[in-house]
Amino acid sequence: MFSPRVLKSASSLMCRGVSTGQMWKAADMAEVRNRLREIVGASTNWKDHQQALAERTSLSQYLAQSQDELPAKTMKDSAVEAHLPLGSQPTLREKYLNYHNSVRFGRILEDLDSLAVLICYSHTWNKELKRSPLSIVTALVDKIDMRKNIIYPDCDIKFTGHVTWVGKTSIEAKMHVSQYHDGAYTDVLDATFVMVARDPENERAAFINPLKLESPEEKAIFQQGEINKTRRVELSTASLLKVAPAAEERTLIHNLFLNTLDTRTVSFRSRILSTNSVWMEDAKMKGLEICHPQERNIFNRIFGGFLMRKAYELGWANACAFAGCRPTLVAVDDIIFRKPVEIGSLLLLSSQVCYTEGMHIQVRVHTEVLDPLTRQHSTTNVFHFTFCVEKDIPAVVPQSYGESMLYLDGKRHFDETMRSQG
């Protein structure tokens, strides 16, 4: 994540440093989604939509055979600003309002996902073509850091963002969200998404325009993108699904085990909970979604923002039930999109409180699709959320080795969040 100095630079570029003459602006998020449909030739009608996507196959002829064939773009070329007029549109406000008289954060996740896709299309847009031959999809959400606890349901929200790093087929987009309140805009959150470009049929990787850096400030932002990429590779390499825990982590797990042994029985199987503790097995929550066409994206699959909203709402409910009070989101970390979710899928969501510390709760949500004919389960996404409450909460304690790995993974994500915000 950004150091405070670089983060300030990125926000400066997104909010003030980009010429308003070059920035594409949308009056609301509906305009953002309409623009995306125009770019790929999608339709709002279910049957027409399928036909339009079938016609995209012919656009493969416009794909570049190497990145060298494509003109370099600047950060300003991809700058986008979109508004969410909650203050002036009461009917829109109903869609975003929650029963705590705040904004449903799951809806904000949907809007961020749409905006990130548009930012990347703005970077790769070829004015000579009516439609883009690229299929740009979300690969992961690197980080979302909250800057304030309350998002007002009756005040306008502004989204700004632009491309900050590119590889050959992948793009990093950073977004800043602010809200107009008491006569001025105040920070709400900063988000980093990583997108990938694929061919018109969304089957193979496709090349994207290189990024031209125009100032030392932009070079620093791009360098942070390189650092982010290196960090993600290192975290993947050290994943507990691939390698054993570090020595100090093994000691931590063994101490947790020793603290739950029943000293009266002298047995490895007899376990008891210490005061103010909860077994991980008792800190779960599950959900099911039938994936209807209404939730499709411009490529005729389930919208990634919808998946994020559903995962967040389940994770929030899990944290709320665990703590016995309303949790506040601190950060969203490392959301991975492993495979697309097809329309008609049965989507199974499983939320787990995997780590707690003080007043913080780390929640992991795992989603998978179930094929009812073959009964095969396929993981589609993994989500990590950090919440905070206003009181100390019980410690969550693993029993099995698998739960112990979930515990350590949750601790790693929590520690990373605290470092990035410290």
Image (cartoon, grey):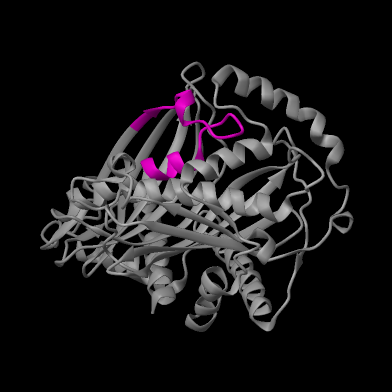
Could you tell me if residue 400 is visible in this image? no
Above or below for 285 versus 140: above
Residue span colored magenta: 288-310
Point out residue 127 in the picture as x, y percentages from the top left corner: 78, 47
The mark total stands at 0
Residue 322 shown in magenta:
no
Q: Quadrant of residue 67?
A: bottom right
Could you tell me if residue 143 is visible in this image? yes
Residue situated in front as seen by the camera: 120 or 89: 89
Q: Is residue 270 left or right of residue 51?
A: left
Point out residue 246 in the picture as x, y percentages from the top left corner: 47, 70
Q: Say which residue appears at 68% left-offset and 83% top-offset.
A: 216
Quarter in which the C terminus is drawn: bottom left
Residue situated in front as seen by the camera: 404 or 34: 34
Q: Is residue 77 left or right of residue 162?
A: right
Above or below for 110 versus 376: below
Above or below for 153 versus 258: above
Point out residue 73 in the picture as x, y percentages from the top left corner: 75, 62
Q: Say which residue appears at 37% left-offset and 73% top-offset.
A: 418
Residue situated in front as seen by the camera: 391 or 126: 126
Point out residue 160 in the picture as x, y percentages from the top left corner: 51, 61
Residue situated in front as seen by the camera: 353 or 100: 100
Q: Say which residue appears at 35% left-offset and 40% top-offset.
A: 350
Q: Is residue 200 left or right of residue 406?
A: right
